[in-house]
Amino acid sequence: MNKKNERKKIAFYIGSLAKGGAERVFVNLAAYFREEGYAVVMVTQYQKEEEYKLPDGMERVLSDIEEEKVSASRVVNFFRRLNKLHVIWKEQKADLVLSCIGKNNFMAVVTTMGTKTKAVVSVVGETKEEYPSRGMRMLADFLFSRAAGVILQTERSKSFFCRKVREKAVILPNSLNPAFIMPRYEGVREKRIVSVGRMDANKNHEMQLRAFAALKDKYPDYTLEIYGDGELRSHIEETAAQLGIAERLFLPGVVQDVAARIEKASLFLLTSYSEGVSNALIEALALGLPVIATDVPSGGTEELMTDGVNGLVIPAGDQTALTRAMDRLLEEPDYADRLGREAARIQESLAPERVNSMWKAYFEKVIDK
């Protein structure tokens, strides 16, 4: 227990703890600050059935209005939510609240006004998707410039905001999931091509299927495995059948032991149209897998990879580029292995103890300012 920080309190504010990248980062950060001796409270708008588990004894508060107080008027409900969140900050007396994802950031800044709690907003996804309209962008500029801190994940994302926000913003990475910190597998790689991510249109798994189908005769012993689930699962299965690769496609769903499942694979694919900084990509690199990833607009891939050094970077949506990159790495395993060895070095730069200390130093600076 760090006595110096014993009386400092950190609040984390997010929609829910449903199993996603941002939610996992929040749970891990909350656990870290608690271990460092801070008082920690997790504030979520609502609670879902399948969620990340908080450490035993960590306080959790729900900010959504009670069912009996829900009005037929959306405007009335909005102001009731604002008021309840404002009351939560006054009661909790946290020194700092970290919020993330879209409108949550707006809510955090507005509702902490008139309290002792300093709001730090964070953007973990593609900025243009979190704030798509001109009005939301203007509101983000207005409110973020009044926040105590702004955390972004890529240098490229700064250009979205006005000068005042750009000058205030800092870049802080996500730490690596400890489950992916292990010696790189150095044996003969299994003839499997793997991907991890929700089955939705943005992840563009269909491009993986079509690239794999284009190479299926040249590499008849390889399979394609996509870990995750989502609304496009049936579409993926139907497309695989149409392409004649149904028997070579495996969809294990959401699994707990991803690292053990993919560490011996020959190739990892990330084909998203947009991402913030992909946790799945970080984890694949950490395992030392040969990786092909799309250059997403946020610059998230650029933050992690250098084309031809620790993996291959291709334009988003470019099926021909993906097919060529897959062909090259499968045809040249020694080259693929060199990329994978270099990729594994990310274990050092994104080690939890290193990254968490960066977040701690920033929070302390904001609190003491």
Image (cartoon, helix red, strand yellow):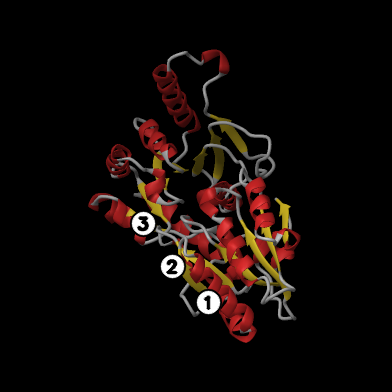
The mark that comes first in sequence, 2 or 3, is 3
Image x and y of residue 93, in percent: 46, 34
Instruction: Decide which of 328, 308 is in the foreground and name it.
Output: 328
SS for callout 2: helix
Mark 3: which secondary structure? Answer: helix
**Residue receiving disc 1:** 310
For the point 61% across and 50% down, the residue is 199
Q: Return the x and y of residue 214 as percentages of the image width and height.
A: 60, 69
Residue visible at 36% across and 33% down in the picture: 110
Going from N to C along the chain, the mark reached first, 2 or 1, is: 2
Q: Is residue 195 above or below residue 265?
A: above
Residue type beneath disc 2: Glu
Residue hosting label 2: 302
Which residue shows up at 42% across the image and 49% down it? 123
Callout 1: SS? loop
Q: CA distance from mark 1 to mark 3?
A: 23 Å
Tell me the residue that label 3 is attached to: 157
Q: Amino acid at mark 1?
A: Asn
* Position above or below: 92 against 276: above
Is residue 230 something that shows in the picture?
A: yes
- State the image coordinates of residue 221 (x, y, percent, origin top left): 75, 73
Residue 181 on image: x %, y %: 65, 67
